[in-house]
Amino acid sequence: MEHDPVTLDPARIRDIYSLSVSQQLFDGLVQFDQTLSITPALAESWKASRDGLTWTFTLRKGVKFHHGRDVTADDVIHSFTRILDPRTKSGAADLFISIKGAQEFRDGRTPRVSGLVALDRYTVQVTLTEALAPFVSVLAVGHAKILPKDLSEQQGEAFGLHPVGTGPFKFVRWERGKEIILAANPDYFGGAPRLPRVVYRVFAGGQFDEMYDEFQKGNLEDSPIPARDYRKILASRSHVYVRRPMLSVRFYGFNIRTKPLNDPRVRQALIYAIDREGLIEEVFLGRHIAAHGILPPGTQGFNPNLKGYSYAPDKARELLRQAGHPGGRGLPAIPIWSSVRHEGIVREHEKIKKYLEAVGIQAEFHYLIDWPAFSQMLGEGKLPVFLYAWYADVADPDNFLFKLFYSRSPRNFTGYSNVVVDEHLIQARRERDPRTRVELYRRAEQLIMNDAPIIPVWHYTYERLFQPYVRSVEVNGLGDPYIPLRKIWLDRK
């Protein structure tokens, strides 16, 4: 992993590193399969009312948490209520706000969520105030895992350091900055994993060269591919190479609450000044798909005709002139922050610095490879420009546009706010006609791009090397966190 997780508490997850580990420790009611279809997990079956407002889930009987107690409906009610509790500060609370009584509970007007009911020990009923199209998919996301009510209540925030779930692996040890160790759960309801343990090695700051060196020595079963000797590595037949498109977007975000980035003309100038396709080709050897907007190809609502920003330095200069900064005069140096620092990133930043200097903008690059510290500064609005990547929780446009750009979303790190965009996003959540819903998301995305709160750079392509003896690796469009490690086995012969 490129960083330590912040926490292993599913409700509090805010990064892909936490998600990758917790996904192996916990189960939800349902889960995604390799094709992103919804399949049973802790719920053996479920049904919805005709109006889509009432969902009833029947739990598997006899499933046990890692500390030995059976999973019951009360644990489900507790886990979902906890996501909605403002004290938890869960980034997934907005996904559950359509549950009846959720808003009243969050406002402190009622002690429980009226739409969450345990009909009996193994049956849970969820009542919604509106039938949101992706609701059942929401229950497959990494936040919606079921926790043991007793331990969760006793330990509070400390639960994230010593997690207990129902998953195929059990938590053993976490040495920050070094490794996290999990052991197989022989009593897993889906069958015992074929791996006796999993070790996550931490290479803070994304040290891909170091990871690959360890891979070559046989100290790792998998590795990302470093930029050095990229094509030579791919030509080698000494490993298994896995590649597939991912539902993701990587971008530089502007904190539009700070000067001079509160001026959309300055933000637009920054976008026009950078040859993003050139960066992908020259620095990263064309390994990723250039992002012209926010939604990645393959997402419902992806708009191939979106009006984005080309590489146009002359337009950048003209916009700066209109903003009162001809030739960049009067502009302070723009601080750009990154949580990773490896050879590719440094080369990318060197090129960006030259692109910006060519239109009169000075940039300063800062690196904070302590992810929890970087994440905290991001949440506190202390980073003027920041490099960020978003990997979808759900294969739905809502998970990109609402999560990152709705004015009151906890993951709206840019401070972006547009009343019309908010209206489109809320309406799209309620819309049941797929064509109308797609049109609303496309309008919202175009408005966001016009306002330029981010510089979209690329959509990731999942690329990974595995040792030749690693078998049964399944990768879906959500990437690393959703690889079912319980299915993997090693054929060292």
Image (cartoon, rainbow, N blue to C red):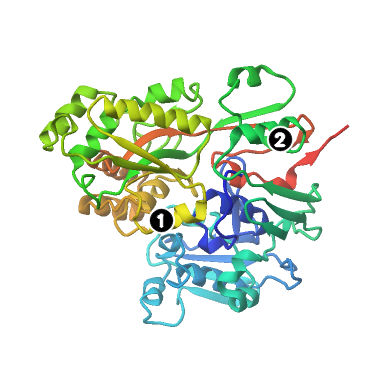
Query: Residue sitting at 76 percent across and 35 percent down?
Result: 470
Name which residue type carries label 1. Answer: Met
Q: Label 2 amino acid?
A: Glu
What is the quadrant of residue 217 in the picture? top right
Q: Where residue 325 sits in the image (x, y, percent)?
A: 14, 35
For the C terminus, the quadrant is top right
Asked whether residue 387 appears in the rendered view, the answer is no
Compared to 115, does 215 lie above or below?
above
Q: Earlier in the sequence, mark 1 or mark 2?
A: 2
Q: Residue at x 76, y 58 (%)?
A: 188
User: Which residue is nearer to you in this view: 363 or 39?
Assistant: 363
**Residue 121: quarter of image:** bottom right
Q: How many marks?
A: 2
Q: Could you say whether the residue bearing mark 2 is in a helix, strand or loop?
A: helix
Residue 114 higher or lower than 213, as above or below: below
Residue topped by disc 2: 214
Q: Are marks 1 and 2 in contact (CB under 8 Å)?
A: no
Q: Which mark is residue 377?
A: 1
The residue tagged with tag 1: helix, strand or loop? Answer: helix
Whether residue 14 can be seen here: yes
Residue in the image at 43% along x and 38% along y:
250
Residue 452 sits above or below residue 68 on the image: above
Q: Position of residue 234 (x, y in %)?
A: 64, 20
Viewer-closest of 105 and 215: 215
* 283 sits to left or right of 422: right
Residue 332 image position (x, y, % from top left): 23, 41
| Alpha carbons under labels 1 and 2: distance apart | 32 Å
